Image: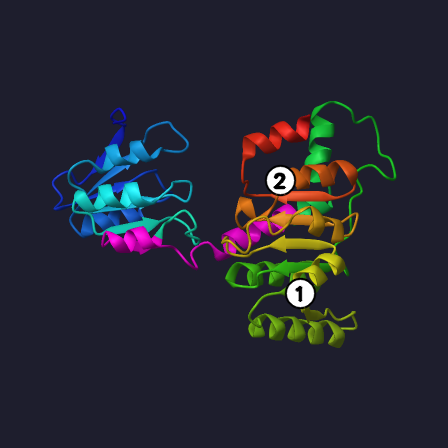
Amino acid sequence: MAKPLQVEVYNPNGKYRVISTKPMPGTQWINALIEQDCRLEICTQKKTILSVDDIITLIGDKCDGVIGQLTEDWGEKLFSALSKAGGKAFSNMAVGYNNVDVNAANKYGVAVGNTPGVLTETTAELAASLSLAASRRIVEADEFMRAGLYDGWLPHLFVGNLLKGQTVGVIGAGRIGSAYARMMVEGFKMNLIYFDLYQATRLEKFVTAYGQFLKANGEEPVTWKRASSMDEVLQEADVISLHPVLDKTTYHLINKERLAKMKKEAILINCSRGPVVDEVALVEHLRANPMFRVGLDVFENFCNLIRTSRT
């Protein structure tokens, strides 16, 4: 059994004991639980990722529900422990739930919740920010300046790529993928190509309407295209943003072969799940193609990625 962990307690005399494995932004969620007569215990241990044993220690002998994180492995052991403690609910602070064994939750009678819609614009904005940073080489230029290497302007110094008129490719045009596409189309007047198993009708109508607006104002209209395959997106797009769910079919979706299909100066953005990209293949591709750029919000193995990229 793991050692006791530091917790911050709210409403200590509450009827229902709820655990949050991490402090979370804001106070609205805390107040909502207190209003429902919950004793809320927030783990404040200075440990980035809690182990299964850590969480079992937090659950203890009596626990009615847990709010957990996508970095935690919610499977047989944790749902068994929660059920034995009388728990009936687990909430994952994420849209995706690839870290949750839903069958195990059903087996032990624990309801599982997630947060669809809450992070749509937030994640889309981050993907757009990474796209801009990569295209305009902002991080490289910042490091260059901080290292004291700048001694004057040069015509080709960190010029980067113009986004206007280029093609943005979206793989997975759900809520987040569509929100990102709208930002890039309207914000930078990029053309769109997307691949999804389902037709993104609202997105298509948006791009069509914006294209008509531009044309009416004497500008080149933007266009959209629904690709028949993912490879078509990889081959045609200048900026490619990944927004699929993570399952067996999307594990290492972007591998050595698919990276080779992309343009030499393409930009790849991943704000979905780390294992969607084969990071070993990615590092090799970056070494072989110095003008290829990447913006990553998620990682399969951050430590190994950094170590590999530096060797």
Residue 290, visible in the rendered structure: no
Residue 52's x, y, as percent? 33, 35
Q: Mark 1 points at which residue?
A: 229
Q: How many numbered marks appear? A: 2
Sequence-wise, the earlier of marks 2 and 1 is 1
Q: Which of 282 and 240 is in front in this view?
A: 282
Residue found farthest to the right:
155
Tell me the quarter of the picture where residue 306 sits.
top right
Which amino acid type corresponds to the residue marked 2 in the rendered image? Glu
Residue 62's x, y, as percent? 15, 40
Point out the image quarter for the C terminus.
top right
Q: Which of 174 and 87 is in front in this view?
A: 87
Tell me the quarter of the picture where residue 81 sits.
top left
Q: Give the range drawn in magenta.
A: 102-130
For label 2, the crowd category at 10 Å Cα-Cα, with few meaning under 14, some 14 to 19 and many 20 or more, is: many
Q: Which mark is residue 279?
A: 2
Q: Which of 69 and 255 is in front in this view?
A: 255
Residue 90's x, y, as percent? 29, 50
Residue 116 drawn above or below residue 61: below
Residue 213's x, y, as percent? 69, 74
Q: Which residue is drawn at 86% across and 39% down?
A: 156
